[in-house]
Image (spheres, grey):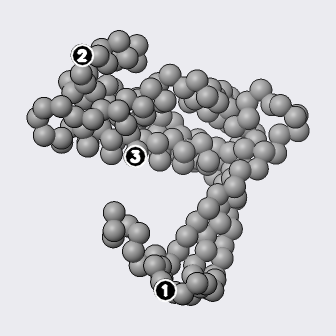
Amino acid sequence: AYQQNNDLIVFSYAKAEQRAKEKKPANEFKELWVAKTYIQAEESFPTNRRRVGVAKSRRIMMSPVENAATTVMEKNEELKHKVDKVRKAPEGPVDVGPLSMILNGMIDAAVNGGTQKYIEAFLTKEFEEKADAKSLFMQKQLKNALRDQIRDLKDGLEVFGKRREESLKGLHEHLQ
């Protein structure tokens, strides 16, 4: 953790922009653009100075399909990390809480409709007919990420099933 948070010079943040014409769209992901800003500081962090100047700043816009593909790929990496942590834990009791939470959130997505909304927004003939070359490339990335997600979820459920306590049997059956 120390290496990840030491000698940092580039920082980023993202801000969502809803560009839908309707006030409450049926699928908010169709028009959800993301402005990602990268800031390069004049000095690396941590530092003993109160303020450090900005050397460079760059803002890029991510299209809705690019945002969807990126989000799914990042979630897949997070899932793999949690699965590996549980898989590599020593024999005996292991904390499967973080793994069960991410599995539950990905499989039984109660908030925002989950991956089904991405499928409805970007994996349709209508989208393909209107899309430019970059959007079609990102659609392919999204399809691949969703395929990977299915494989990784199966693996995660298998690991969870092997390492869970008996009290989590109901959750495991529900997720399967």
Q: Which mark is residue 87?
A: none
Identity of the residue drawn at 37% across and 17% down:
171
Real-space Cα distance between discs 1 and 3? 34 Å
Residue holding disc 1: 48
Quarter occupied by the C terminus: top left
Q: Secondary structure at mark 2?
A: helix
Q: Earlier in the sequence, mark 1 or mark 3?
A: 1
Query: Is residue 38 visible in this depiction of the protein?
Result: yes
Which numbered disc flags the more N-terminal residue, 2 or 3?
A: 3
Q: How many marks?
A: 3
Up the image or down, 56 lies above or below 129; here it is below
In-front residue for pair 98/73: 98
Relative to 70, 97 lies left or right: left
Give the residue displayed 33% in from the left and 45% down from the top: 81
**As shown in the figure, which amino acid type bears the numbered disc 2?**
Glu
Residue in front for this viewpoint, 44 or 129: 44
Q: Whole-percent x and y of residue 48? A: 49, 86
Q: Which residue is mark 3?
A: 77
Q: CA distance from mark 2 to mark 1?
A: 50 Å
Q: Residue 63 location, x and y as percent?
A: 69, 50
Amino acid found under the numbered disc labelled 1: Asn
Label 3's element? helix
**Mark 3 surroundings: few (<14), some (14-19) or many (≥20) residues within 10 A:** few
- Which is more foreground, mark 1 or mark 3? 1
Residue tagged by mark 2? Answer: 166
For the residues labelled 2 and 3, the Cα–Cα distance comes to: 27 Å
